[in-house]
Image (cartoon, grey):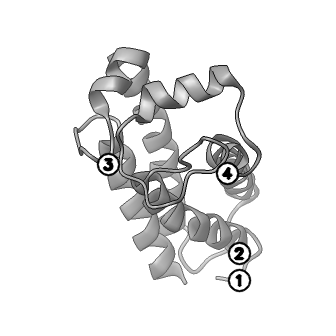
Amino acid sequence: MQQVFVLFQSILLVIFLIQDTVNLAPFNNLAKQVKFLGWTKLILGTALMSGLLGLSLYLTIHYSGVPLPTSAKVFFIIWYGMTMMGMFASWYKPYFFGLTPKEMEMYNQLFAGTHTILPVRNGFPGPNTLHLVLHFFGFPCAVLGFLKVAGVF
């Protein structure tokens, strides 16, 4: 489990570093994101998310085979709890329950023209393919993070 956790966090870190800073069309729409948010917000968001994920990866490697100290346990619970809540609130709640017109406009501004494989629901295309890849690695990381806190590995 330890090796899978390290691998998945490493993959997520690479994706976090490039998703909002490198044009990966059609998987992101960097020009629209820059126009809507500006480079400063994109770089700060990338630095924050990548830094926190980097800390999680560091703690995972540093405490390999030994119990996590309380401070690391608290960090894992907060980091992965917030990540899962954010994933749900940002993508799956709107997909399954709909958006306000203002929220729909924001998503259209940020993600217009990006590749998606999910069918449109409530007028919302749902998580684009790049975010589905993030979620594919992010959800297992959260589960593994909670298992690490529980001392399973």
Q: Is residue 107 above or below residue 74?
A: above
Residue bearing the label numbered 4: 92
Q: CA distance from mark 3 to mark 4?
A: 18 Å
Residue bearing the label numbered 1: 152
Q: Residue at x 53, y 47 (%)?
A: 125
Sequence order check, earlier mark of 2 and 1: 2
Judged left or right of residue 90, residue 60 is left
Q: CA distance from mark 2 to mark 4?
A: 24 Å
Residue bearing the label numbered 3: 27
Tell me the number on the disc at residue 147.
2
Sequence order check, earlier mark of 2 and 3: 3
Element on which disc 3 rests: loop
Q: CA distance from mark 1 to mark 4?
A: 29 Å
Q: Is residue 98 above or below residue 119?
A: above
Q: Is residue 55 above or below residue 21?
A: below
> Which x, y percent locates residue 149?
72, 68
Q: How many marks?
A: 4
Can you say which quadrant of the picture contains the N terminus? Answer: bottom right
Q: Residue at x 22, y 38 (%)?
A: 23
Answer yes or no: do the residues labelled 2 and 1 have beta carbons within 8 Å? Answer: yes
